[in-house]
Amino acid sequence: MKRKRRKSYNPYLLPPWLRKVRFYCKQMIIPIAVFQGLRTLFLPTTGDFLLLILLIFIAWLLWIDFI
């Protein structure tokens, strides 16, 4: 049984509006995650911690061009 090979990701195949949204999200996710990290450092709650983990995960996915 052969495994299907995943097509390589090409962001230029996306519609222009989606490329813009992805570009701006990529630019803004790091400052938002840093702010959330500082907030979690001073006022730690479960919700803040989970949000920080989610933001770091999204930033990582954007960095490796998975999203």
Image (tube, rainbow, N blue to C red):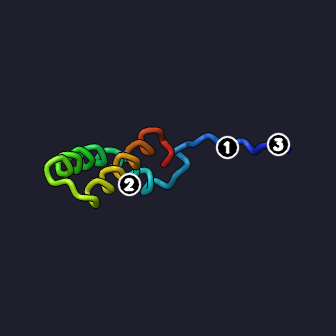
Relative horizontal placement of residue 39, taking residue 10 as reference (left or right): left
Provide the secondary structure element on which disc 2 rests. helix
Residues 52 and 12: in front is 52
**Residue at screen point 67% across, 43% down:** 6
Dot placed on the residue nearer the N-terminal end, 2 or 1: 1
Q: Are marks 2 and 1 in contact (CB under 8 Å)?
A: no
Measure the alpha-carbon separation of dots 3 and 2. 36 Å
Q: Amino acid at mark 2?
A: Val
**Residue at screen point 72% across, 41% down:** 5
The x and y percentages for residue 20 are 38, 51
The residue carrying pointer 2 sits among few (fewer than 14), some (14 to 19) or many (20 or more) residues within 10 Å by Cα, namely few
Relative horizontal placement of residue 10, taking residue 23 as reference (left or right): right
The residue labelled by disc 3 is 2
The x and y percentages for residue 21 are 38, 54
**Residue at screen point 55% across, 48% down:** 13
Provide the secondary structure element on which disc 1 rests. loop
Q: Are marks 3 and 2 in contact (CB under 8 Å)?
A: no
The residue labelled by disc 1 is 6
The residue labelled by disc 2 is 21
Residues 13 and 42: in front is 42
The x and y percentages for residue 58 are 40, 49
Dot placed on the residue nearer the N-terminal end, 3 or 2: 3
The x and y percentages for residue 24 are 33, 49
**Residue at screen point 29% across, 43% down:** 30
Q: Amino acid at mark 1?
A: Arg
**In the image as oriented, which residue stretches furthest toward the left?**
42
